Image: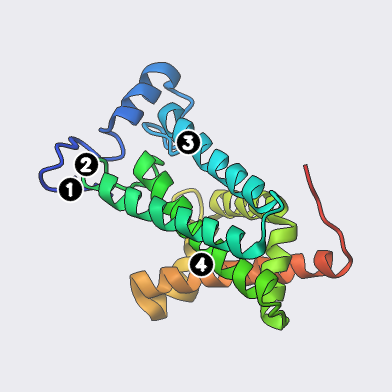
Amino acid sequence: MTLVPVPGSGAGDLSPEGNLAAWLDRALMEGHLYRGTWDPEGILSSLPAVGTSLLGIFAGEWLLSGRPKEVLTRGVLRAGMALVLAGLVWNVWFPINKNLWTSSYVLFSAGTGLILLAALYWVVDLRGRRGPWLTPLLVYGTNAITVFVLSGLMTRVLGRIRVGGDEGTSLYGWIYQTLFRSWAGDYNGSLAFALSYVILWQALMTPLYRKRIFIKL
């Protein structure tokens, strides 16, 4: 997929192989890149990813600061709105791009995450609204790293299993094409596939949650 620069931004070549991050990765790590000629987790992409992690740490420290819950909620919400706005403005000159993990993507994604966090904190901790609707979030949240690692591992395994011989498609692609794209089309099929994968891991992680087994680093 070729990414088109924002008109007037002067962003240059934002194609997967033509951007600065890909050039630097090929210059320093040729032969060790995830996509052959580019890597979504390369050198330049890892630096802003650290920024995403730090923003999460700052949010956690704020919520643990002991301030009144109303103050905590307003603080997270305001920070989230400010980051979203900053990300959208910065996007004019430096486009939001997940594969490159651009700084505008860091601002926008962190901001939307903080807004959702503020909403949940207000509903659950401030208003005390709890119920079955919260269980899926707890299942994923209490074993987040486990789900991340195992789901990624399963995707890689399904991608290596070939259907129809060496020249055939991967099992991952076959599942998407046969069970989802065949009846829902490209976009809706992709969405249905993604939601089904989320539901699958929800079902796989639920027994761990019920037995209070939480795997942490």
Marks 4 and 2: which is nearer the front? Answer: 2
Classify residue 195 as left or right of residue 154: left
Residue visible at 27% across and 33% down in the picture: 19
User: Is 140 located above or below residue 91 in the figure?
Assistant: below
- The quarter of the picture where residue 95 lies is top left
- The x and y percentages for residue 73 are 57, 62
To which residue does mark 2 refer? 93
Q: Nearer the viewer, residue 115 or 174?
A: 115
Q: Which residue is mark 4?
A: 194
Q: CA distance from mark 2 to mark 1?
A: 7 Å
Residue type marked 1: Val
Give the SS element for disc 4: helix
Of mark 3 and mark 4, the one earlier in the sequence is: 3
Q: Look at 60% across and 58% down and name the residue there.
A: 72
Q: Mark 1, residues whose alpha carbon is within 10 Å: few (<14), some, or many (≥20)?
A: some
Q: Residues within 10 Å of mark 4 (few under 14, many from 20)?
A: some
- N-terminal of the pair, mark 1 or mark 3, is 1
Q: Is residue 163 visible?
A: no
Q: Nearer the viewer, mark 1 or mark 3?
A: 1
Circles 3 and 4 in contact, beta carbons < 8 Å: no
Question: Which tag is nearer the camera, tag 4 or tag 1?
Answer: 1
Looking at numbered disc 2 in the image, what kind of residue is underneath it?
Answer: Trp
Residue 192 in the image: above or below residue 154: below
Which of the marked residues, 2 or 1, is nearer the chain's N terminus?
1
Toward which corner of the image does residue 151 lie, by quadrant?
A: bottom right
Instruction: Tell me the element at label 1.
Output: loop
Per the image, the residue denoted by label 1 is 6
Q: Report the residue marked by disc 3.
A: 41
The amino acid type of the residue labelled 4 equals Ala
Q: Position of residue 138 (x, y in %)?
A: 72, 67
Of callouts 2 and 3, the N-terminal one: 3
Q: Is residue 89 visible?
A: yes
